[in-house]
Amino acid sequence: MKKFDNVTTHRLALGASAGETYMRVSGTSTDNSIVRTEMHLQNEHNPSLSEVRIKIRTGAQIVRTLKIPKISFLKIDAEGFDYDVVVGFGPYLKMLTSFRLKLE
């Protein structure tokens, strides 16, 4: 990833509430995903996948912790967890100057 002064990466997932979950990890980052309960059982039989335990934080927690004064752009592509991520931002969604939502 290129280095940008205004971009910081964090090893966590965003969701509707804080907690922990498992992330399925494969050879490429585009194949990584949160593991749903039924997938967790299937992955036990697939040696090409591994799972790591990760923290889940809400967008609201991140905004408060990092003291983000303004959100000018927010892109969410959470492979089926988009709604949970949006809910996690709660009242901070009002910070957005423009809002478009596209769920796939």
Image (cartoon, rainbow, N blue to C red):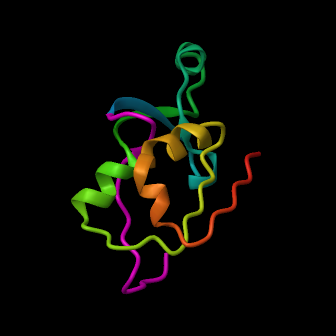
Name the magenta segment's main secondary structure: loop
Q: Which residues are magenta?
A: 1-18
Q: Nearer the viewer, residue 49 or 23?
A: 23
Count of all numbered marks drawn on residues in the image: 0
Q: Quadrant of the C terminus?
A: top right
Q: Position of residue 27 (x, y in %)?
A: 57, 49
Q: At 48% across and 82% down in the image, what residue appears?
A: 2
Q: Position of residue 61 (x, y in %)?
A: 29, 49
Q: Is residue 6 above or below residue 81?
A: below
Horizontal arrangement in the rendering, residue 45 relative to residue 17 (left or right): right
Q: Nearer the viewer, residue 11 or 89?
A: 89
Q: At 41% across and 56% down in the image, what residue appears?
A: 92
Q: At 45% across and 39% down in the image, what residue appears?
A: 15
Q: At 48% across and 33% down in the image, what residue appears?
A: 50
Q: Is residue 40 above or below residue 23?
A: above
* Residue 4 inside the magenta-drawn segment: yes
Q: Position of residue 26 (x, y in %)?
A: 56, 43
* Residue 61 inside the magenta-drawn segment: no
Horizontal arrangement in the rendering, residue 27 relative to residue 63 (left or right): right
